[in-house]
């Protein structure tokens, strides 16, 4: 028995719920998995959940010695600086042919920059859009890969294996050409979610205001609509959310939630891509800017006063 | 055997495909149906399809003598003037307690006006939003009723019977208070469709332009997205549509379709309702106006010329 | 000396500041003016200001006996129901050929309805857009007339006389065809003001937030911009407004004003006209809906709570 | 007489019309100017226009030996790569204390990057927004400076001298703190122009379509509006433009101009800044995206066909 027989097929780095579920999914499909995380407490809890099925090592860099060549690592960590930091840590230890797959919500520009950086070392970098949430990660995500065709081909087997399967059995794994195409496609995808949420918000306002629907009628209406051509996953879960009651006050839960929306970037990036390439994206821009406006609302000081009617600035226009 | 035993439970007026399917749906649920249409050729073809299950009479007004009191009529004709014309024809023949249900895409303002008009005669008028298309009409539409509570209650049994059933068996039949509430809710519902279509159009442009996706990859991407939180009925059918090939040219079908969108009113009415009631509907407004812009594009005369660079009006702003 | 010699050339009905100033302007141009108002206290104060130059009568209807035939009346009262009420009061007393000019901010649809109503009596109704504010009314407004060509021609002399004069001496008095064209043009004009104000608001946010400009630098910047191609009347007065200090707090006045904008209709009507005629007006729609959103902001109850991070609805989209 | 007496106070690099006019403006204010350009033919024509008042040298780098220390250079060349190229050429020859002023339409991000680069050499870099066009450059531009406070102070005298003077005699020269603040402010300024132009375009459509105004009435209306609160410089010149007649066809010139608008960047940057800093700029975004949409319109192939009515995709939504 040689040492190679003990080596793993693939590593998962970053053991939040997405990483853990993808590790288990890979294991289910017959891939031998090693996993690591930079945070000791995450390692402890991941070990409790994953071992002995998946080998959990103490630090990310430790996965390297457990992997068959070419070493393939699926990175599931927070997008942005942490990815660059991880690359800097790994670079001195990587060999030509090794493959890093970034499965986070990275900007496609960053993906292209990182590909160029690692290409100089002969290391292959694949940008992978992962969609479907925690459940998807565990039992079948939608995967969108972009990068060097050779690298994408090299990781197609495990990615196709863990992906969701369409009605005809085809894996929900798409390859979108070189560069950051996988992350670009995943990003554009989120633009749809922004607009559907904007649509639901606007309809909520129309139904609660002018139509005067109360909580139960609102929920019922959204459930009905989900049987029509307006049907969508987000409408389905919205019907559930608007039906919730705040246990403390007995009021509808949505009235108790601060109406200030945040974002993590993909919607903004989609609009920026539209601006950069001259693609008209007025709907996604409108939805993003509505969020920006909502999150800006500073609480007004108690001293904030309304000018007397004679100075009502808001009415001036119609008098001019 | 009295004459009353032969009388029908409900009439369907307007025998286009929606009306015919609703008549058959009512018949399936045990309601005895009489049906009529103002157009003789429609009567002929409806008779061939519906009789003997459904009694088809020669003109709309003829349904009256076949109905039990209070006479209940479901009107499925083109929204707008035809509904007013039909009401004018029927008014002299209606009796207090009779019920007219308008199942067309009527404006909620019109519904409220007609209710007030008929109320003076003691006739009850229900505005009914019907969603689900032809298939829904035949096997289970989503129904949204508004009007006098007593009138809505009187027609709830047949409407609940023919409506689609949710997972828990509850009928997709909602009642939304007095006036035009049913048509208002149906109208707002269409606002979602406008925004989802706008989202799909914007993503199509991002994927076909900057991301360079061809027909098959585009369709594949949309199919993948339908496995994620962006999933919607319109995304599902869009994945099918973008995969179609134009048989004459071999080009993707969507490239061969004139990019000029029309509308039949509900999207515009939704924005107008937002304007009237001061509800911010920037997303639906953006989607509607994008359609307005697309349909406006006049074909430019061949003589249309571009000014020489020195007069490039479009660039002036950045020089100022 | 016959009685006719004592009769007036034109009446002004409605003696708010606009009506009083137009009456004085007409008098300056050699027209003999009679004026009335429905509110006794307004009559008292108007009498003090206008007599003996202008004859002030006790009620609107009293102007009739002071006018030469055909009797011409410029109505400067609040748009909407008051105009209809005044017409109902006057109708029994008007004679064929009499002319009513509505100089208020009426909807062009209303103007066309009123024209049709009065046409049956042979009475002529002109819809007049008046722009330029109080100063303009006194020394030269911009006037936009629409209505029956014969009626518009009959009132062109006094209207051209009181209108502002362009650089070449031509009067700022335009005639825009039949129906409500004058009010339509005035309405569209206000759309510009909505968008310029939206532009100024957006720039204010960019300069006060990211660029960190304080009150004085902001005012200085706006003054500088008014020397460029971005120059406009509204920019000019905004430069003054943003420089104001709240005397109670010493803070910039604009920070003390509730950021909730109202409107009196013309902006909304402009968007509705765009929707009705299929004209793309996304900019004016955006500006109007931004106002709608600002005025909707209900003060949140003190009990309003923010969900704990785990339930941060706003971030869900980017995780999906 | 020492050599220093012959040295110049300031250099202008880039002798397009803006650079030439600023050079003459500086000379008028008592500054001794040396000027250069990278293109020999530009040097020839500039020499003909500017000498002997202004010393014109053969290449940009030649200005260095004609300048007093600290050497101050106003760069008026095309924004983007040319500025970086010029900096690379100059860097080896610059000394601590030298000052480069970039008066082009540079992105404020680029300005901040260049400041950081040159700071390492002790060279000071000022980002200067210049507004007012050719006329302004010659007789008084509006100037917006940002950069190291010491550097900005060092160039305030000549910049204040050449700037336009407000009514109270104050120079239209603003300093906006460190970094790219000057270019940021100039950029935001252009957002106003985008929105005013969008407003004018939307009003043009409302007046030419629904209101049916022809060329002369349109021009007249815009001239009238310029006497009201909607007054702006862009409205004033639009009134002139819409009155022009195409000499070949006799049609209004605006109908002959291809309705496809381009841009040079500042509008896009303004929206991007809004996205980046979370500032709601829906109006400017709408205006920019309307341009993007207009410029995208590909001429449709002659073979482009409209689907038969049965397949009218555009109408599907209202039927669902």
Image (cartoon, coloured by chain):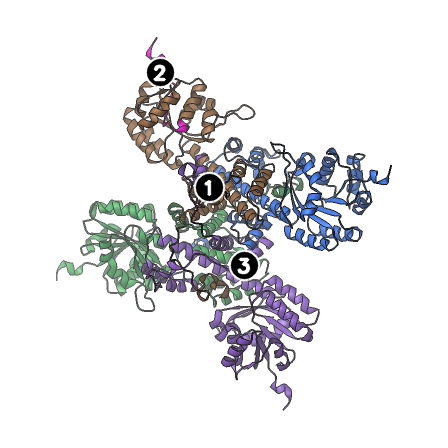
Chain colours: A brown, B blue, C purple, D green
Return the x and y of residue B306 as percentages of the image width and height.
Answer: 50, 52
From the viewer's side, name the closer residue of C111 and C86: C86
Return the x and y of residue C212 as percentages of the image width and height.
Answer: 32, 53
For the magenta stretch, what is the residue range?
A1-19
Q: Chain of mark 3?
A: D
Quarter of the figure that contains the N terminus of chain D: bottom left
Q: Nearer the viewer, mark 2 or mark 3?
A: 2
What separation in Å lies between label 1 and label 2 (alpha carbons)? 54 Å
- Looking at the image, residue B312 lies above or below residue C84: above
Q: Chain of mark 2?
A: A
Indicate whether residue D300 is drawn in magenta: no
The residue sitting at the right extreme is B1
Disc 2 vs disc 3: Cβ atoms closer than 8 Å?
Answer: no
Left/right placement of residue B34 relative to residue C61 reads right
Indicate whether residue A8 is drawn in magenta: yes
Quarter of the figure that contains the C terminus of chain D: top right
- Disc 2 designates what residue? A7
Left/right placement of residue C315 relative to residue B62 reads left
From the viewer's side, name the closer residue of D141 and B273: B273
The residue sitting at the left extreme is D1
Left/right placement of residue A61 relative to residue A16 reads left
What separation in Å lies between label 1 and label 3 (alpha carbons)? 76 Å
- Disc 1 designates what residue? A248
Q: Secondary structure at mark 1?
A: loop
- Disc 3 designates what residue? D248
């Amino acid at each position: 028995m040689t040492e190679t027989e003990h080596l793993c097929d693939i590593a998962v780095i970053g053991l939040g719920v997405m990483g853990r579920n993808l590790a288990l999914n890979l294991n289910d499909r017959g891939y031998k998995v090693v996993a690591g995380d930079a945070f000791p407490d995450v390692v402890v809890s991941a070990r409790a959940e994953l071992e002995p099925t998946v080998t959990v090592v103490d630090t990310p860099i430790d996965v390297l010695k457990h992997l068959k060549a070419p070493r393939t690592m699926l990175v599931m960590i927070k997008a942005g600086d942490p990815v660059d930091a991880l690359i800097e840590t790994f670079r001195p230890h990587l060999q030509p042919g090794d493959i890093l797959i970034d499965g986070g919500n990275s900007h496609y520009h960053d993906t292209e920059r990182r590909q160029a950086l690692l290409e100089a070392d002969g290391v292959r970098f694949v940008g992978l859009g992962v969609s479907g949430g925690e459940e998807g990660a565990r039992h079948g995500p939608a995967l969108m890969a972009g990068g060097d065709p050779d690298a994408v081909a090299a990781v197609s087997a495990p990615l196709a294996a863990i992906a969701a399967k369409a009605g005809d059995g085809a894996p929900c794994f798409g390859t979108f050409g070189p560069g950051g195409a996988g992350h670009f496609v995943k990003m554009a995808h989120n633009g749809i979610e922004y607009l559907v949420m904007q649509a639901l918000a606007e309809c909520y306002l129309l139904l609660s205001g002018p139509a005067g629907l109360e909580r139960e009628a609102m929920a019922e209406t959204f459930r009905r609509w989900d049987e029509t051509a307006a049907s969508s996953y987000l409408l389905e879960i919205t019907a559930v959310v608007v039906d919730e009651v705040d246990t403390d006050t007995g009021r509808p839960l949505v009235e108790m939630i601060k109406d200030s929306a945040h974002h993590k970037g993909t919607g903004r990036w989609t609009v920026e891509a539209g601006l950069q390439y001259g693609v008209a994206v007025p709907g996604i821009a409108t939805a993003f800017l509505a969020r920006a406006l909502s999150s800006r609302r500073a609480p007004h000081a108690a001293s904030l006063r309304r000018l007397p009617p004679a100075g009502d600035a808001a009415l001036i226009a119609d008098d001019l």
